[in-house]
Amino acid sequence: QVQLVESGGGLVQPGGSLRLSCAASGSIRSINVMGWYRQAPEKQRELVATITRDGSTNYADSVKGRFTISRDNAKNTVYLQMNSLNPEDTAIYYCSLNIRAGILRNYRDYWGRGIQVTVSS
C-alpha cells in the first residue's frame, strides 16, 4: 500500500559528500515526521535526523553541523545531505516516515529497505 524507495548511497572517500533520498508512494493521505536512521555492523540502529511537517529538525550529536535533513512535501520525499563524511559514518541508512495511508485514521511508521553508505579511502 505504501512503498519507500531510498537512493543516493554508495562509496565515498573521507571528507566527501553524499545525498540520500527517500521517496514514498502509494495511498498516502498525510506524512507527519520523516527521519533517517543508520545501523553499523554489530551495532544497534540509531537515530540520525528527523524533520517534522513544519520543518523542525533534530540531529544526533555525531552528525550536527555535517548532515542536513530536508523534505519536499509535494513529492513525499525526504533528503539527507551528508558532508565531511568519515569512516564512522559507514552504515546502512534507513528512512522512516510516519504516514497516514488509505482509509486508516491513524498514522504508522513505514521503513525503507536501507541503503549502504561506505566511507573509505
Image (spheres, grey):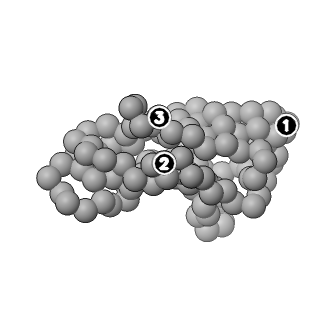
Q: For numbered disc 1, what is the local secondary structure?
A: loop
Q: Which badge, 1 or 2, is on the more N-terminal residue?
A: 1
Tag 1–tag 2 contact (CB < 8 Å): no
Residue 91: percent from left, percent from top: 66, 51
How much space separates mark 1 and mark 2, taking CA atoms?
A: 31 Å
Q: Which residue is mark 3?
A: 72
Number of the label disc, if any, that sits on residue 54: 2
Q: For numbered disc 3, what is the local secondary structure?
A: strand
Q: Reply above or below: 80 against 59.
A: above
Quarter of image, res 67: top right
Tell me, yes or no, if residue 94 can be seen here.
no
Residue 107: percent from left, percent from top: 30, 60
Location of the C terminus by quadrant is top right
Q: Reply above or below: 115 against 45.
A: above
Quarter of image, res 61: bottom right
Mark 2: few/some/many CA within 10 Å (<14, 14-19, 20+): few
Would you say 30 lies left or right of 111 here?
left
| Amino acid type of the residue tagged 2 in the rendering | Asp
